[in-house]
């Protein structure tokens, strides 16, 4: 299988690329900064115009994460949405030339649903109601993809991802509570606790994430799907799991909750499971133990 990928330098793109290449697949990676292992994003549409077919085009390139998006309000409208529009136009032009085009797979976020205040999990039937700049931009990108692809009969897939964990981070740009917790222990410094610790999140192990993306592509899915674990864990429970696994105690530094952060996140993968047969196989306790074993030799 051959896939094209943007954002291969990122945390998700990197593990997906490694996952497929280990299985003998071909990954053609594109980046804003080309080098020996990455072609220039400026050349992506030229690739789409050739007759070298690929199974999918995985679009992971994105200029912000939730925290940085709040520091640069609206930057995605200047950088990411124009890039997406260019890719969509490239697919359209290639299709009009009779070229077999790859399925566009866009990596969105479950945070587009906004704040959960209900007794059931968010499904794909629920409307988007984002509360931060990052999720708002992802929702806008979803809308653009749906309008353009449906009007021009282009194949597309939007995957709404929960909170993936379990892979090595660049410790200069940590993203997610799990790597921040681990770094607090490694560096023996207080963990900055935003809010009262009752916020609940869905954590998806990176192995399940990769298997899920692979299943989605092989089944030629079209439309919008949640890719998540389907269970929620509070920050207090997560801290307790860390302490239990490592045998170490946490010092915390309490800070006010961030207005843009989703505090109650519960999602269902039922639609995705019906379509592919995929189910998450790694519970949080097991996934944390794998992750922390490497860090602390436990």
Image (cartoon, rainbow, N blue to C red):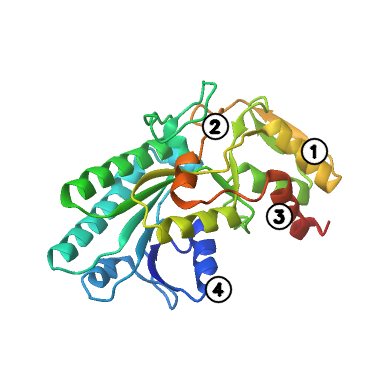
Q: Which residue is mark 1?
A: 250
Q: Residue at x 51, y 73 (%)?
A: 21
Q: Which quadrant of the figure contains the N terminus?
A: bottom left
Image depth: mark 4 or mark 1 in front: 4
Please tell me which of labels 1 and 3 falls first in the chain.
Answer: 1
* N-terminal-most mark, 3 or 2: 2
| Badge nearest the viewer, 4 or 3 | 4
Query: Left or right: 201 with respect to 50?
Result: right
The residue singled out by tag 2 in the image is 265
Task: Examine the rendered structure and indicate whether residue 144 appears above or below residue 38.
Answer: above
User: Where does residue 59 sit, x and y in percent of width and height?
Assistant: 37, 57
Q: Residue at x 51, y 57 (%)?
A: 12
Report helix, strand or loop for mark 3.
Answer: helix
Q: CA distance from mark 3 to mark 2?
A: 23 Å
Q: Which mark is residue 291?
A: 3
Measure the alpha-carbon separation of dots 4 and 1: 37 Å
Mark 2 nearby-residue class (10 Å; few <14, some 14–19, many ≥20): many
Assess whether mark 3 and mark 4 are in contact (beta carbons under 8 angstroms).
Answer: no
Q: Position of residue 160 (x, y in %)?
A: 44, 44
Q: Nearer the viewer, mark 1 or mark 3?
A: 3
- Is 297 in front, or is 280? 280
Q: Where is mark 4, residue-wise? A: 22
């Amino acid at each position: 299988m051959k896939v094209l990928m943007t954002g291969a330098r990122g945390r998700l793109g990197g593990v997906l690329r490694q996952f497929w290449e280990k299985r003998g697949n071909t990954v053609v990676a594109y980046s804003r900064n080309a080098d020996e292992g990455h072609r220039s994003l400026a050349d992506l549409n030229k690739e789409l115009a050739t007759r070298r077919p690929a199974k999918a085009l995985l679009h992971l390139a994105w200029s912000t994460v939730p925290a940085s998006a709040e520091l640069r309000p609206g930057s995605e409208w200047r950088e990411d949405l124009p890039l997406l529009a260019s890719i969509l136009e490239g697919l359209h032009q290639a299709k009009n030339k009779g070229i077999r085009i790859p399925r566009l797979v866009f990596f969105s976020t479950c945070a587009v649903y906004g704040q959960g205040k209900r007794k059931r999990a968010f499904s794909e039937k629920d409307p988007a109601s984002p509360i931060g700049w990052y999720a708002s931009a992802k929702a806008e990108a979803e809308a653009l993809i749906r309008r353009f692809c449906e009007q021009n009969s282009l194949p597309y897939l939007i995957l709404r991802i929960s909170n993936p964990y379990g892979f090595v981070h660049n410790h200069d740009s940590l993203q997610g509570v799990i790597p921040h917790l681990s770094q607090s222990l490694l560096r023996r410094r207080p963990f900055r606790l935003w809010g009262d610790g009752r916020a609940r999140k869905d954590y998806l192990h990176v192995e399940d994430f990769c298997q899920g993306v692979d299943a989605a592509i092989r089944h030629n899915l079209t439309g919008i799907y949640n890719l998540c674990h389907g269970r929620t864990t509070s920050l207090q429970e997560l801290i307790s799991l860390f302490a239990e696994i490592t045998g170490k105690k946490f010092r915390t530094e309490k800070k006010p909750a961030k207005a843009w952060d989703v505090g109650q996140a519960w999602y269902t993968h039922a639609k995705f499971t019906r379509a592919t047969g995929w189910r998450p196989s790694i519970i949080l306790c097991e996934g944390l133990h794998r992750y922390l074993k490497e860090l602390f030799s436990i």
